[in-house]
Image (cartoon, rainbow, N blue to C red):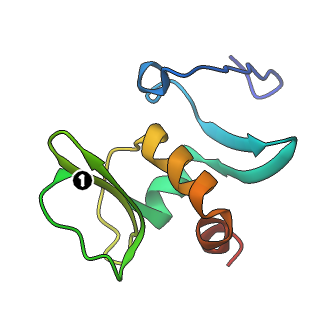
């Protein structure tokens, strides 16, 4: 891959491509809801995966999972986290304004 080439991957198995991609574009009915680099996403958002408790006031999105909760939070402490595309996708679709606000600042 070079900067002059783009590969579009459309899949329901996002965990298979999370480590391969550099840019994320989330579309809904031809409308771009989010467009950002994975580096920028992880710098601005913290992904809590399989946690037992989530502060609902701080969470941008929370989804119950078998092992606890998956959540998207503002990365206020600049912690490293592993990008969870499925949680990001669901969070953007459920509340696009709230998450997009983070990237337009």
Q: Position of residue 58 (x, y in %)?
A: 36, 79
Task: Tell me the quadrant of the picture where the C terminus can be found.
Answer: bottom right
Viewer-proximal residue among 66 and 41? 66
Viewer-proximal residue among 48 and 38? 48
* Residue neighbourhood size for the residue with mark 1, other residues' Cα within 10 Å, grouped as few (<14), some (14–19), many (≥20): some
Pointer 1 residue: 69
Q: Position of residue 20 (x, y in %)?
A: 50, 24
Q: Secondary structure at mark 1?
A: strand
The residue under the point 25% across, 76% down is 55
Task: Give the image quarter of residue 8.
Answer: top right
Asked whether residue 47 appears in the rendered view, the answer is no
Q: Position of residue 71 (x, y in %)?
A: 34, 58
How many numbered badges does the structure rendering display? 1
91 up-or-down from 75: above or below: above
The residue under the point 62% across, 52% down is 93
Task: Give the image quarter of residue 62.
Answer: bottom left
58 up-or-down from 24: above or below: below
45 to the left or right of 102: left
Asked whether residue 98 appears in the rendered view, the answer is yes
Viewer-proximal residue among 83 and 52? 52
33 up-or-down from 96: above or below: above
The residue under the point 80% across, 21% down is 5
82 to the left or right of 10: left
The residue under the point 18% across, 39% down is 66
70 to the left or right of 2: left
Q: Position of residue 49 (x, y in %)?
A: 25, 48
């Amino acid at each position: 891959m070079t900067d002059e080439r783009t590969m579009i991957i459309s899949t329901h198995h996002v965990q298979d491509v999370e480590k391969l991609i550099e840019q994320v574009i989330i579309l809904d009915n031809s409308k771009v809801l989010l467009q950002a680099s994975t580096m920028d996403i992880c710098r601005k958002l913290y992904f809590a995966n399989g946690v037992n408790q989530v502060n609902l006031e701080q969470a941008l999105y929370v989804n119950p999972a078998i092992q606890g909760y998956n959540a998207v939070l503002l990365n206020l402490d600049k912690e490293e986290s592993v990008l969870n595309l499925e949680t990001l996708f669901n969070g953007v679709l459920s509340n696009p304004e709230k998450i997009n606000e983070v990237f337009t600042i």
